[in-house]
């Protein structure tokens, strides 16, 4: 049985950069465009929003004012956060900041304060209960909200669209030595061609089902994007008028 060892202050300070960078990559996976800075920028966005939400309690403050506060806070936080991930600077956050970091990264303080490599103990419990690898659970938690919504739609549909896709993918990946009663147009054709035809037909049907179920979410997303574009266009227009 593994037992967690509480780190001394020197150990905490020494190990924090590596643990912090590892958590960044897991909670904010790098995209293909800017792998080095993407995770850090996503963290800074979330961290700045958290800080501003604690400081700004007036519900009448405009979204434009909040956006400006977040932008300013992000600029203030960047040097400090960059120092946390630099092992050569020998710096680590104080407990108050550490709790905020854990909130943004959705991890237990024990991840930083002990020798454990598990970000969140509940993740390991989910891994055990679902029969999935811990890394899989952590990756799903890092999905964007729209991706999670789509995953919900796929699994809650009737029949289960996600399960159907997985079955067809597995079916296609298997080596099948014989297929009974192939379509007439495939008589004398390689059996793998028949398999590909049937699989593509089945997958196309499932994708059509997903598309229909996803339509309300897609329409809502498009509406949100249009509203954001209108806001940015109005902001640009106001700046030009100054």
Image (tube, helix red, strand yellow):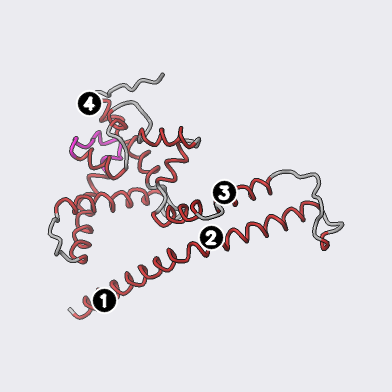
Q: Which residue is mark 3?
A: 163
N-terminal label among 2 and 3:
3
Q: Residues within 10 Å of mark 4 (few under 14, many from 20)?
A: few
Kindly report the distance in space between the C-alpha atoms of the residues bearing marks 1 and 4: 51 Å
Q: Is residue 177 left or right of residue 108?
A: right
Left or right? Give the position of 206 relative to 240.
Answer: right
Labels 3 and 4 touching (C-beta < 8 A):
no
**Residue at 37% in and 51% down:** 38
Tag 1–tag 4 contact (CB < 8 Å): no
Between 108 and 87, the residue placed more toward the observer is 108
**Displayed quadrant of residue 72:** bottom left
Mark 4 = which residue?
Answer: 9
Count of numbered tags: 4
| Distance CA(mark 3)–CA(mark 4) | 48 Å
Question: For numbered disc 2, what is the local secondary structure?
Answer: helix
Instruction: Give the percent coordinates (x, y) of residue 80.
Output: 22, 44
Nearest to N terminus: mark 1 or mark 3 = 3
Say what secondary structure mark 1 lies in: helix
Foreground disc of the pair 1, 3: 3
Residue depth check, mark 1 versus mark 4: number of the one nearer the observer: 1
Residue wearing tag 1:
234
Quadrant including the N terminus: top left
Q: Residues within 10 Å of mark 2 (few under 14, many from 20)?
A: many
**Magenta-drawn stretch contains 33:** no
Disc with the residue nearer the chain's start (2 vs 4) = 4
> Which residue is the site of mark 2?
210
Give the extent of the magenta segment: 83-96
Alpha carbon of mark 1 to alpha carbon of mark 3: how far? 45 Å
């Amino acid at each position: 049985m593994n037992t967690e060892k509480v780190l001394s202050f020197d150990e905490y300070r020494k190990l924090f950069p590596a643990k912090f960078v590892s958590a960044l990559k897991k909670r904010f996976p790098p995209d293909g465009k800017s792998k080095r800075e993407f995770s850090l920028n996503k963290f800074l966005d979330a961290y700045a929003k958290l800080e501003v939400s604690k400081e700004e309690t007036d519900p009448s403050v405009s979204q434009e004012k909040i956006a400006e506060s977040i932008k300013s806070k992000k600029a203030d936080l960047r040097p400090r956060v960059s120092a946390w991930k630099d092992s050569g600077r020998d710096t680590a956050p104080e407990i108050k900041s550490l709790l905020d970091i854990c909130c943004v990264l959705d991890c237990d303080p024990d991840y930083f304060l002990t020798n454990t490599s598990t970000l969140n103990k509940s993740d390991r419990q989910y891994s055990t209960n679902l029969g999935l690898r811990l890394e899989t659970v952590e990756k799903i938690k890092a999905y964007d909200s729209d991706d999670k919504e789509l995953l919900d739609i796929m699994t809650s549909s009737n029949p289960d669209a996600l399960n159907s896709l997985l079955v067809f993918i597995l079916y296609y990946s298997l080596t099948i030595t014989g297929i009974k009663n192939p379509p007439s147009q495939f008589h004398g054709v390689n059996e793998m061609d028949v398999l590909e035809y049937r699989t593509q037909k089945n997958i196309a049907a499932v994708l059509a089902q997903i598309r229909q179920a996803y339509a309300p979410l897609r329409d809502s997303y498009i509406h949100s994007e249009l509203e954001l574009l209108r806001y940015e266009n109005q902001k640009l227009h106001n700046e030009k008028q100054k």
